[in-house]
Image (cartoon, helix red, strand yellow):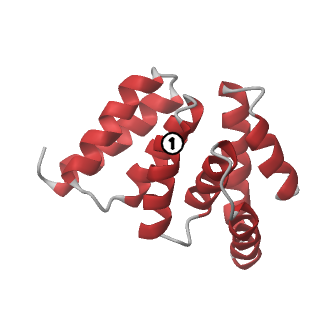
Amino acid sequence: MNNINEIETEFNKALSRYKAGEEIQILVEDFKKIINQIPNHFAAWTCLAWLYLLSKNNDDALFAARKAVKLNGQDVQARMNLSLALLATNNKGVRDHIDLIKRIIMMAPDLEEDLKLSVEDGFSRYPEWKELKKVQKWLDF
């Protein structure tokens, strides 16, 4: 797996398998392989952070979320993951990320629906996710 198109195909396959309910730990390994091939693949870092959050691996989630935001600071999912990881690890700075998400959504309202779907997905996989409940409340949806 060294061709960028092949890696993107693997990324899309892993994403589809996630949506189909594949075991999280298997997917973590797949996204790590993608990142090893393309270290600046922000979407893979974003997915990895989400998977770590779902598996309550909060320290690794924080690392992956910070990396995703560093690579693409305008991605609302990456920012939401970072907010969740900061909350889960009792770190500061959550409000700044929530405020930025709100500003990005005001400029690009179509992104709000994707984020709402992500929140729904999070609750379907982790119904009592207290950090996600807080973030959902702060984002007003």
Which is more toward the observer, 129 or 111? 129
Which is more toward the observer, 58 or 73? 58
Residue extending furthest toward the bottom: 107
Q: Who's the residue at 82% across and 58% down the image?
A: 139
- Residue type pointed to by label 1: Asp
Q: Who's the residue at 76% across and 71% down the image?
A: 99
- Provide the secondary structure element on which disc 1 rests: helix
Which is more toward the observer, 51 or 58? 58
Name the spot of residue 94 as percent of width and height, x first. Answer: 71, 61
Locate residue 34: give its quadrant.
Answer: top left
| Total tally of numbered discs in the picture | 1
Q: Who's the residue at 87% across and 51% down the image?
A: 137
Q: Quadrant of the N terminus?
A: top left
Residue ID for mark 1: 59
Name the spot of residue 123 as percent of width and height, x first. Answer: 73, 32
Name the spot of residue 53 as percent of width and height, x first. Answer: 57, 37
Name the spot of residue 5 as percent of width and height, x first. Answer: 21, 54
Q: Is residue 129 left or right of residue 29?
A: right
Locate residue 15: give its quadrant.
Answer: top left
* Residue 106 vertical position relative to residue 82 in the rendered view, above or below: below
Q: Is residue 80 left or right of residue 134?
A: left
